[in-house]
Image: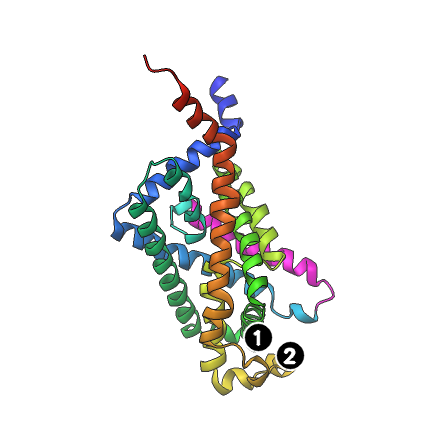
């Protein structure tokens, strides 16, 4: 009976902080090759979530139930983070919480920064690689080109924010993502973790917040369809129905991907994850413990 009660009881908030810290230590101390491999799958799995999201958005622009369609898209996208968590893949946005063991001197600055850099590189390679694979599979022509239209519209919207908007939306996105990871660490079962992840992820996607790793897939996907879709795509029924032209999305370029989105969104993600979640909950639950240890009399 006691075992059943333990399984049905979630971890208390101070315990979540300890579990999260240990997870971050383990990730930061992995071998660099293993770390890179897990980062590749992290970027690819988030891309898989966005494939599902894009499929759910086909024709959504002309839908009277636009808000509900976005919620459905957010629920679809949550599959990506579920795959990341359950397979142990590494995601740059959640690695920002490794600031917790850094503050507590459980990892050194070299381990911390190399972890961030390797995971970021692996994520972008995995995400862009998946985008090319999806293009080669002809997915963009689903619904007579409707999938490609949805992909381009999403990518174009992402590079159309001001720098400040992209930064702020990046903060909000990783606040939600890191809270999803944080609360999933309270769960003891698969069901617990699924429920903890789904809500915050659906919230950030449906609300249009900006996630750097998701954008490593979504914007290159839009760029690839725009530049290599050819007459098959640009002459399709869905493109004609949407009134989409290459000139209308001329701002969707490689430079706008980096300068107008990826850089400010990444910086916002760092603030949202490392400060609003990592440092904040360190101050709430771990700092008092550290202070108590320092003030204990020497015997």
Determine the image quadrant of residue 23: top left
Residue 130 in the image: state x and y as whole percent: 40, 65
In this rendering, position of residue 121 left or right of residue 176: left
Instruction: Find the magenta span and give its range.
Output: 63-85
Q: According to the image, label 2 marks what residue?
A: 242
Q: Main secondary structure of the magenta part?
A: helix
Q: Nearer the viewer, residue 245 or 282?
A: 282
Q: Is residue 13 shown above or below 254? A: above
Answer few, some or many: residues within 10 Å of disc 2's Cα (few below 14, many 20 plus, some between 14 and 19).
some
> Is label 1 in contact with label 2 (beta carbons under 8 Å)?
yes
Whichever of callouts 1 and 2 sits on the residue coming sooner in the sequence is 1
Q: According to the image, label 1 marks what residue?
A: 149
In this rendering, position of residue 164 left or right of residue 181: right
Answer few, some or many: residues within 10 Å of disc 1's Cα (few below 14, many 20 plus, some between 14 and 19).
many
In the picture, which quadrant includes the C terminus? Answer: top left
Between the residue at mark 1 and the residue at mark 2, the CA separation in whole angstroms equals 8 Å
Please, what secondary structure does the residue beneath circle 1 have? helix
Residue 136 in the image: state x and y as whole percent: 40, 74
């Amino acid at each position: 009976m006691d075992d059943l009660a333990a399984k049905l009881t979630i971890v208390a908030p101070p315990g979540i902080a300890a579990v999260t810290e240990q997870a971050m230590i383990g990730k930061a101390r992995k071998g660099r090759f293993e770390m890179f491999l897990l980062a590749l799958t992290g970027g690819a799995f988030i891309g898989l979530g966005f494939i599902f999201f894009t499929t759910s958005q086909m024709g959504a622009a002309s839908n009277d139930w636009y808000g509900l369609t976005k919620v459905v898209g957010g629920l679809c996208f949550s599959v990506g983070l579920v795959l990341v968590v359950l397979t142990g893949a590494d995601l740059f946005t959640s690695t920002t919480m490794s600031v917790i063991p850094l503050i507590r001197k459980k990892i050194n600055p070299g381990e911390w920064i190399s972890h961030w850099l390797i995971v970021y590189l692996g994520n972008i390679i995995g995400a862009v690689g998946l985008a090319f694979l999806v293009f080669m599979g002809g997915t963009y022509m689903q619904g007579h080109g409707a999938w490609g239209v949805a992909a381009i519209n999403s990518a174009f919207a992402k590079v159309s924010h001001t720098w400040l908007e992209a930064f702020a939306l990046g903060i909000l996105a990783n606040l939600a993502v890191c809270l999803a990871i944080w609360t999933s660490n309270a769960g003891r079962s698969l069901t617990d973790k699924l429920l903890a992840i789904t809500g915050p992820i659906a919230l950030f996607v449906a609300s249009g917040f900006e996630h750097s790793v998701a954008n490593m897939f979504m914007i290159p996907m839009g760029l690839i369809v725009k530049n290599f879709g050819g007459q098959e795509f640009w002459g399709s029924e869905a493109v004609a129905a949407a009134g989409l032209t290459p000139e209308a999305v001329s701002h969707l370029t490689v430079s706008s991907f980096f300068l107008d989105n990826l850089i400010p969104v990444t910086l916002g993600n760092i603030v949202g994850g490392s400060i609003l979640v990592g440092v904040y909950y360190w101050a709430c639950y771990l700092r008092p413990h550290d202070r108590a240890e320092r003030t204990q009399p020497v015997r």
